[in-house]
Image (cartoon, coloured by chain):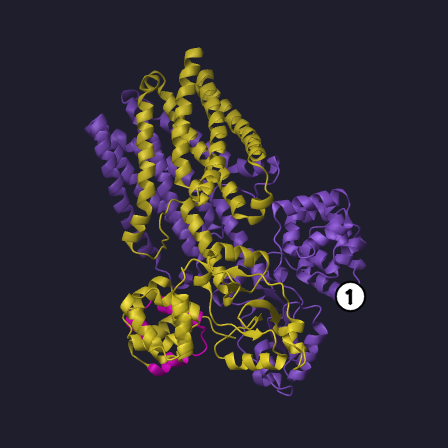
Chain colours: A purple, B yellow
Amino acid sequence: MSIEPTVDFVKTLEVAVEQRDTKIIREVLKDVHAADISIILDRMSADECRYILSLLDKEISADVISELEEDTQRDFLKDFEPVELAGYMDYTDSDDAADILNLLPVKMKEEVITSLKNKEKVAHITDLLKYDEDCAGGLMAKELIKANINWNIKQCIEEIRRQTKNVEKILTVYVVDDFGMLQGRVSLKKIILSNDDTRIKDIAVPQVHVVQTYYEKEEVAEIMQKYDLEAVPVVNMQGKLLGRITIDDIVDVITEQAEVQQQMMSGLTENVEEDDTVWMLSRARLPWLLIGMMGGLLGAQLMGFFEGDLELVPAMAFFIPLITATGGNVGIQSSTLVVQALANPATGLLGSSAGSRLFKVFLVALINGLAISSVVFCFIFFFKGLSLAFTVSIALFCVVLLASFMGTVTPLMLDKLGINPALASGPFITTANDLMGLAVYFVIARMLMTAI
Amino acid sequence: MSIEPTVDFVKTLEVAVEQRDTKIIREVLKDVHAADISIILDRMSADECRYILSLLDKEISADVISELEEDTQRDFLKDFEPVELAGYMDYTDSDDAADILNLLPVKMKEEVITSLKNKEKVAHITDLLKYDEDCAGGLMAKELIKANINWNIKQCIEEIRRQTKNVEKILTVYVVDDFGMLQGRVSLKKIILSNDDTRIKDIAVPQVHVVQTYYEKEEVAEIMQKYDLEAVPVVNMQGKLLGRITIDDIVDVITEQAEVQQQMMSGLTENVEEDDTVWMLSRARLPWLLIGMMGGLLGAQLMGFFEGDLELVPAMAFFIPLITATGGNVGIQSSTLVVQALANPATGLLGSSAGSRLFKVFLVALINGLAISSVVFCFIFFFKGLSLAFTVSIALFCVVLLASFMGTVTPLMLDKLGINPALASGPFITTANDLMGLAVYFVIARMLMTAI
């Protein structure tokens, strides 16, 4: 079983690297998985990283480089010699190699490609560099096993043998015609259980889920998740087989997507991580803080119109946080449910109509609004008297209804406009609801105070 | 290529079901994937669902049942005859069958198990029912291909042939000794490329990532994601091979985990979906709304102490929403970053210390606090004069620092206590920050007003 690095382990390694003790480094890293080595190297300096990589098996080093964090790759690899980097890239899958090359300065990218020994890889990589990184074309690897539909099993096995070094995980064999058009697939199980002279044509499954090069990565994730696929072939418009996307890349897409949604919900404008620089972190946070601040200042202006009422009943100010906080909470709860429903492909097709959706939201808001307002009414009635109790609880009730409505409609509208609806679950809805809540509160207060 | 159902398609099917037109239903569903059929059935009535399932191939029906939403399974399946359900379960993978049986009333569960024809499946299922659904034992399927380490390739292929109906996707062959202890694995590629008399011992890879039955599903997800695995074997404490977990189940775990985190962040206490009942939705929302309400009422009490100041300067009330909203926004931004760092396994081991983490948070808060406070100072100075401008901007600056600190420390503390830290990014932090912000604002105001 492979070894997972502990804190002690990392210390031993650090000491060995400091003393340039080749033997110990090799010994220590012998049974460690590339994914674990890359986690350690992520925390080291560029020089140390380069040194350790030079001591490992080229194939392992290639895997380690692919697994490094993108920031680390960008920082470290630009100091490598092009020939040195090309030496590793010769062992990297085409999709990972293309991703790495995309991080390099243009001149160095060209130099690395020129220095590659494996000429098939050069063709693969230059093909992949054409595609946007966020679409199926940018996610696919060119390495796969394809068999001509007219072959027999023996020929197919020969092809597997020929490609065995290039394609680490076969998963499935894709069947193509003489023009490279995808015709189906054959599982390895069937190949094992068939005779050498069985024709591929007779055992191929024609139903294959495919994606086109231009599909967005979220669409690819949706398809692979829905149909439980370990790999999906990528074809062009004509149906020609170009590559395949494996589930490990899609798992990363799903995780990243969830992180981005969370960050949108919490008002971070760039994809930052806790270990980014102070400057990057500040910059990612500032835009929404400024928007929230502008909302707050607008709220102050708005309340200026009601200064007279506040002078008359200063206790009105006490319940401002209650009104704004409740509006915010209700709004975020509502929008999150809509955002999650929108993210679920099944609901898109067969979901309920906008009308019945809003009616349901209204009912839920009614129940929760009544519950909260009643408690608040009793509390204020007891401490501050009837007229303030009426004002606050009625305003609160209206705010719950309005915030539910806004929280439901905003993400639906953003989605229609092609904007990520998760944005609506963040500071956006809070700021809007703050302003709305204040307006409702003071207008109702003035109406009731004059009435009573 | 398989057909994806459109709205028209669903309508055609609904009409056919109404008219009990067996022929059209069979024709229409012929090329539709089980995952798509289940999405349609999720929206139908229990009777319609049962009727459609009875028309399909038993194997397809079994897949459809496994793919139905959990709520639907719970609602529909309890009305099935035990023998009828057992007829489908005979074709279901052991892990899916166990999940479904866990939803049924105890008596019906026993009846279904007794009615199963496949006696090996009975043994598998009763074994799986022992494990908690949220751990590796509850996620694993018993169906897998294992080969004895002393066999040769020919014997291994015979085993694959024997199991071909039970194990749909082989992915890898697990190697065990005479006592069933896991010794390694062999890829199908190697089996294809080896001669019949090659010994398994000579081509097996001894390094295998394994999980134990008691591992939590999040741990399993972490391991499979880190090492890019399509399947992981499950062993007991002694190292005996018990089953395997495939990546499709883990993709669902990852998605579900992200949804739960989002819901925690937005103050929903149960795992609800937009299409749940009004009552369930209200119940999931109410607890946090009540806590937020209590926070608001506490805030009102707190401000009561400062009623004199408010009477003196009613304009102070204008900036309450600015203070509370900024505190909330900063707190959520900070806590989200910590929550995401905690979710990243790499950071756990080699992450920075609490001290340097807090210092960085302090620097970011300093930059953002200065930026916002300066703008606010200028604005209020222009509209309301120097003394209020000083009060609000200094209070705002302090609130940004405090909220950053709270937003960082709270999730770390919750994590230490074994509580999901995502809770700290939700209404929890907002409510706490509202109260703290108000206190800071009014205390600073009183101090400055007396000073100036």
Residue drawn where x is 39% and y is 40% of the image: B427
Where is residue A114 drawn, in percent x and y?
80, 59
Where is residue B149 drawn, in percent x and y?
60, 73
Can I make out residue A300 in this image?
no
Where is residue B152 drawn, in percent x and y?
63, 79
The secondary structure making up most of the magenta span is: helix
Residue drawn where x is 35% and y is 80% of the image: B55
Q: Quadrant of the C terminus of chain B?
A: top left
* Above-or-below relation of A174 to B386: below
Disc 1: CA contacts within 10 A as few (<14), some (14-19) or many (>=20):
few
Front residue of this view, candidates A24 and B169: A24
* Above-or-below relation of A411 to B385: below
Q: Which residue is mark 1?
A: A119
* Residue lying farthest to the bottom in this orientation: A197
Q: Is residue B33 magenta?
A: yes
Q: Relative to residue A403, is residue A195 drawn left or right?
A: right
Q: Subunit of mark 1?
A: A
Residue drawn where x is 75% and y is 67% of the image: A120
Can I make out residue B439 in this image?
yes
Where is residue A394 drawn, in percent x and y?
25, 36
Which stretch did the figure color magenta? B22-50
